[in-house]
Image (spheres, rainbow, N blue to C red):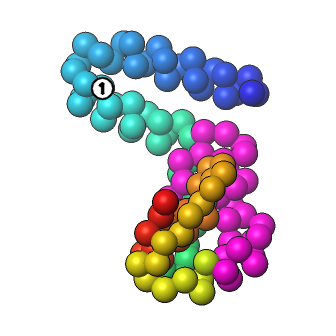
Amino acid sequence: MSVKEELFNSGIKLLKTGTQVFGKHNSNVILGRLSEQLAPIIIQPTDFGAIKFFCPGNLPQFRADTLLTKEPETIKWINTFKEEEVFWDIGANMGGYALYAAIKKLRIL
């Protein structure tokens, strides 16, 4: 884990503790808004709609940026599924392909 990621995680833990005085719901709203400011949200457009990725580090950002290009044969394969068919994503890692299948309205298991 990089120093940047460690600092980010430590800051989130500190904020969680500090914002608990506002109640659980308000605390989550505050943390969500702060997180959006501290880490980029990558929007990956697809033919079926956009997928948003919260990227608190370089690896998630890379995965989001290369979703459609890293394994184009996987995307082509998923495109052969018909709506409501089941897509099993075993060993999903970040789950990018499961998200792609979901936006295509497949059932994900």
Amino acid carrying mark 1 in the image: Ser
Displayed quadrant of residue 24 = top left
Displayed quadrant of residue 73 = bottom right
Please indicate whether residue 2 sits to the left or right of residue 38 in the image. Answer: right
Please indicate whether residue 35 sits to the left or right of residue 69 in the image. Answer: left
Q: Residue 51, position in %: x, y?
A: 50, 64
**In which quadrant of the rendered image does the N terminus lie?**
top right
Looking at the picture, does residue 59 appear above or below residue 88?
above
> Residue at left 25%, top 13%?
21
Q: Residues within 10 Å of mark 1 (few under 14, many from 20)?
A: some
Looking at the picture, does residue 89 appear above or below residue 28?
below
Q: Residue 85, position in %: x, y?
A: 46, 78
- Total number of numbered labels? 1
Determine if residue 103 is in view: no
Q: Residue 104, position in %: x, y?
A: 47, 77
Determine if residue 22 is in view: yes
Q: Nearer the viewer, residue 60 or 72?
A: 72
Magenta residues span: 51-77
> Residue at left 66%, top 51%?
91
> Is residue 58 one of those drawn in magenta?
yes
> Is residue 55 one of those drawn in magenta?
yes
Looking at the picture, does residue 96 appear above or below residue 103?
above
> Residue at left 43%, top 82%?
83
> Residue at left 60%, top 39%?
56
Looking at the picture, does residue 95 appear above or below residue 5?
below
Please indicate whether residue 62 sits to the left or right of residue 35 in the image. Answer: right
Q: Residue 6, position in %: x, y?
A: 66, 22
Q: Nearer the viewer, residue 40 or 101?
A: 101
Q: Which residue is mark 1?
A: 27
Displayed quadrant of residue 2 = top right
Helix, strand or loop status at disc 1: helix
